[in-house]
Amino acid sequence: MNKCIALLLCLLLNSTAANTTQTTLLPEPVLAALAQELSGETAKSNLEFITRFHRMRGSRGFHAAAEHIVKQLRDYGITDAHIEQFPADGKIFYGTQKSRPAWDAEFAELWELGQTNTRLASWNAMPITLAQDSESAEVTAELIDVNNGTSESDYVNKDVRGKIVLTASQPGPVAQLAVERFGAAGIVSYAQNQRTAWWGENENLIRWGHLETFAAKPAFAFMISLKQARNFQTRLARGEKIQLHAIVRAGKHTGSYDVVTATIPGADPSLRNEEIAFSCHLDHQQPGANDNASGCVAILEAARTFSKLINEGKIPRPARTIRFIWPPEVEGTVVLLNARPEIASRIKAVIHMDMVGGGPETKSIFHVTRGPASLPSFVNDVAEHFGEFVHDQSAKFAGGASVPYPMFAPEGGKEALLAEMAEFSMGSDHEVYTDSSFSIPAIYLNDWPDRYIHTNLDTPANIDPTKLKRAAFIGAASAYFLANLKADDAGSIVKLLQAHSLRRTSQMLARRDALTKEEGANLTRFHLAQERALIESMNRFFRIPETARTEADVFVNNLERLVGGTTPAPAPPGDGRLIFRRNTQLKGPMTVFGYDYFSDHYGVERERKLRLSQYQGLRGGAGEYAYEVLNLVNGRRTAQEIRDAVSATYGPIPLDAVVEYLRALESIGVIRI
């Protein structure tokens, strides 16, 4: 044990032997220029404008928000800002994304009829009260409570034909039974928000609702508060009949995906065709302040800052091009990367921002999130480096210390950022970039939890300009460093990886203690392979110098001596030796937005029977396992190796569950043996 401790101390000393005269990976003048110029107030001003619009994909509201982004970019001196448009008609496919037709609403109101008619919901007053993808209708009908409304048992002894059903669930799955099977005329939902510690506490929240874009039968749904629903339930329980009148003028139509994009061209002729991209998503309900006007304006502020500082000569123009992208969430990114493959081929790394401005009222924690284990990349360590810098400076400032970079906005808070350096999590456009059909490393900056996400209370009042400034700084600093990255920086990256490797190794050892000997050995092998892969990931940007490679190899070899690496036994004959490769003509993850490629092609009922579809591991669920299993298919790994990798990442899973899913993917042409 003493020998191991001595070796660990030696590794630690070596890993922190980087140049101590430099605060961060960036030169001090660049660091100072970014910190001084980035403005949380300017970002929030743009946010307040964007949140005026109900920004559904393909809608007039989305287009108006997109035009505002373009105008601001041009005012900031970025002259190539424009809107890319891609047809969306419900039939065209872009990789795994079936295009969803545009959706707009003209008018919608829900009234309770009685001695004094009462308006319960109004599209004009609060667009969130009409569920997305509702279709036109005019109905006067009785209200029937169906509880959750997602199981046939919810309809026993209830005649809902021609009635309006009251449900605790999202309208989409309810419509499949209530409307399509039992003939209900419409839906009123009081679905609560994503579960957090504050779930269900605020009776006045109204959640953004969704109907299925490709539903078999048109439907409409209104969203109401828990307070209003409880009033209805109390009255219905005592036998009162409640008569509602619904008017909806809305519907889907052929339109287009609008994607705003702009660039700051690189200065180096040999590198300007390589790009570092900023990503977000512009769509969501009104107001949709933190989700995701915040990410939109944070990257807009980074664009303004870069343009101004470059034009004023305060920072050099970056060697590589920096691109900015504002699409509809997930589906717009899948569409862009498929329709414009030349853009996808140029992007070396992405900084994705989705919810980065939540103030104290949202109860959110800021995350600097790594990419998936299937795509190890040092770019995530670069983001963590700048995240830790802001965390440290802001914490000292909040505690009363004098620091050079407190990074706060005069009109914002002064609290510490308290950023968490987090493992990969799903749920936004970053998972499109990191899908193995594109394999673009992505940094994901995000808030979670947020008690107001997807509700009427996700308002500008709950957005902190200081948080916007800090998020924009982490993204801008990371992007500028990567845009100028060259082989001479390899030594600094190796030092950074060493320091972070020790932290990751300690976490791995803690996890290993809870596993069987066999699974523990698998975890150790995987961890060491990941650390080596992080070093190799520099090859995406330049050829690694021999001095840096030698230093990195010595470190990982010492690490292996410390933790005890082993050689895996060969896979026994059978399915574990199967090798698959992806269909290169089909790009994108299986689950996109408003459409599930796997479910549609394999069948919902068959999918439910797959073991992996119901699997819950130690650190991940079915969605995470499915995403990574497909990502790991590369024409070289065996099924056993794929199983071992996802087991090390999310917890042990049986080989046959993985093989069964791989066979299912093969049966629909996503992969091939």
Image (tube, rainbow, N blue to C red):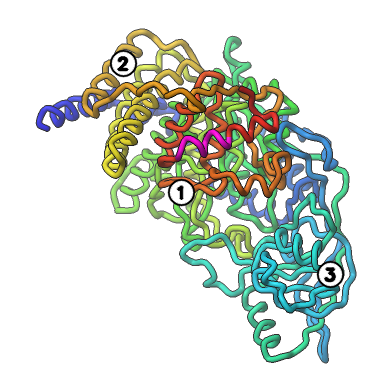
* 636 shown above or below 670: above
Q: Nearer the viewer, residue 565 or 502?
A: 565
Q: Is residue 480 magenta?
A: no
Give the class, few, some or many, for how many residues have Cα within 10 Å of label 1's Cα (few <14, many ≥20): many
Residue that label 3 marks: 185
Q: Which residue is mark 1?
A: 366
User: Residue 216: which quarter of the image?
Assistant: bottom right
Residue 518: x percent and y percent?
Answer: 31, 34
SS for callout 1? strand
Q: Amino acid at mark 1?
A: Phe
> How far apart are the alpha carbons under marks 1 and 2?
34 Å
Magenta residues? 654-661
Mark in the foreground, 2 or 3: 3
Q: Which mark is residue 481?
A: none
Which amino acid, mark 3?
Ala
Could you tell which of marks 2 and 3 lies nearer the N-terminus?
3
Residue closest to the far front:
573
Q: Position of residue 658 (x, y in %)?
A: 52, 36
Q: Secondary structure at mark 2?
A: helix
Residue at the (70%, 74%) spot, across then down? 146
Above or below: residue 247 compared with residue 134: below
Q: Position of residue 583 (x, y in %)?
A: 67, 24
* Secondary structure category for the residue under label 3: loop
Q: Read off the residue under disc 2.
A: 553
Q: Nearer the viewer, residue 267 or 450?
A: 450
Q: Which quadrant holds residue 81? A: top right
Quadrant for the C terminus, please: top right
Q: Residue at x 81, y 59 (%)?
A: 134
